[in-house]
Image (cartoon, helix red, strand yellow):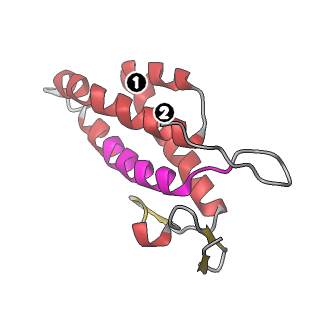
Amino acid sequence: MEEAVTTTAQTGNPVPNLGEIAKWQRRLQFLTLATLLAFWPRYGGVFFLALLPFKLFVLYRMITALRMPDLLLLLMFVPVLDLITLLLLSRRATRTLQAAGIRVGLLGASAKDVPEKGSTQTREGNTASP
């Protein structure tokens, strides 16, 4: 299930899949809010362990979409570093989406603002098929 990686003609850098980034950033935002509950004194440890598989899955999908190193997954096992990592990844995803001209709100980009796969979107928001 390997995707073909397209590159920009000017730089040769891989073009990120904006749809994947937007989808997983929205889930990452909800996960960040849930991670804050893990700092609740009475049940924080249990909640931290219950969230761990979901955090690992969402983080893996996000770092794959952003083409970042997989070593970030190890930070999910440290209680405070996991929150910092989630916040930094969210910031990186927001900047990537905003650079493509997509509006990003508090809980991520809206699905209607993200271009469909196989189409290109200009900064003005006009979508055109190739």
Magenta region includes residue 80: no
The stretch in magenta equals: 15-32
Please give left or right for residue 4 compared with residue 46 in the image.
Answer: right
Q: Residues within 10 Å of mark 2 (few under 14, many from 20)?
A: some
Q: Residue at x 29, y 26 (%)?
A: 52
Extreme-left residue of the structure: 42
Task: Specify whether residue 88 is in view.
Answer: no
In-front residue for pair 102/115: 115
Whether residue 67 is visible: yes
The question of residue 29 being in magenta is answered with yes
Few, some or many residues within 10 Å of mark 1 (<14, 14–19, 20+): many
Q: Position of residue 98 (x, y in %)?
A: 60, 62
On-image quarter of the C terminus: bottom right
Residue that mark 2 sits on = 85
At x 66%, y 74%, the residue is: 122
Chief secondary structure of the magenta portion = helix
Residue appearing at x 39%, y 53% in the figure: 26
Closer to the camera, 82 or 115? 115
Say left or right for 67 vs 21: right
Quarter of the image for residue 78 reads top left
Q: How many marks?
A: 2
* Residue type pointed to by label 2: Thr
The residue indicated by pointer 1 is: 76
Give the Cα distance between marks 1 and 2: 8 Å
Q: Secondary structure at mark 2?
A: helix
- Amino acid under disc 1: Met
